[in-house]
Amino acid sequence: MRRWLEDLEARHGLDALTARSRRLVIGSYVVLLALMLYRGMAIQSDGSSVGPMVAFVLPLVLFLPSILAKRARGHAWLAFVSLLFFAQGVMVASLPGEWLRGGIEALVSLALFTGCMGYARFRSRQIKAGQ
């Protein structure tokens, strides 16, 4: 795996890979945030308080400063948190009639994980190279 990543870096360059990873992070982050807002509003429309919406959205919003500041370490931590959303999406997909929503959530969180791990790797290597 390490050799494959180093070959990828040699072919495309760190700048291009970092930019691609960042675009994947931002896109999947926005989609996952929208999905969690939708889920929270659906639960809230049943008559409950704003607690469920906050519980779904807060873990993502806490990483917004790291994403905006382009911190590699924050992206690495967001990757681990995205795995919780992946597990939740798989669990929701197993419910009757919820396979599409859960499947989309699982795929988007997997894209977020991939983008965050790629960005953390490529950005930290950029910093070590002095770029």
Image (spheres, rainbow, N blue to C red):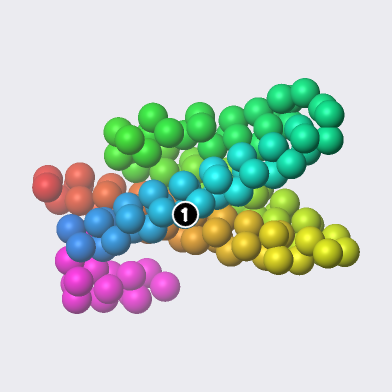
The residue lying toward the viewer, choosing from 9 and 33, is: 33
Q: Report the side of 28 relative to 34 (left or right).
A: left
Task: Report x, y in % for residue 129.
Answer: 15, 50
Establish if 67 lies above or below 109. Answer: above
Task: Report x, y in % for residue 50.
Answer: 71, 25
Magenta range is: 1-14
Does the stretch in magenta take in 7?
yes
- Mark 1 nearby-residue class (10 Å; few <14, some 14–19, many ≥20): many
Q: Residue at x 50, y 43 (%)?
A: 78
The residue lying toward the viewer, choosing from 29 and 70, is: 29
Q: Quadrant of residue 101?
A: bottom right
Task: Report x, y in % for residue 76.
Answer: 44, 45
Does the stretch in magenta take in 31?
no
Task: Report x, y in % for residue 61.
Answer: 51, 32
Q: Quadrant of residue 68?
A: top left
Q: Report the side of 63 relative to 59 (left or right).
A: left
Establish if 8 lies above or below 107. Answer: below
Q: Report the side of 125 relative to 66 (left or right).
A: left
Please name the residue that numbered disc 1 is placed on. 28
| Quarter of the image that includes the N terminus | bottom left
Q: Residue at x 49, y 41 (%)?
A: 77
- Whether residue 119 can be seen here: yes
Q: Secondary structure at mark 1?
A: helix
- Whether residue 117 can be seen here: no
Establish if 54 lies above or below 104. Answer: above
Q: Quadrant of residue 91?
A: bottom right
Q: Report the side of 120 relative to 36 (left or right).
A: left
Q: Amino acid at mark 1?
A: Ser
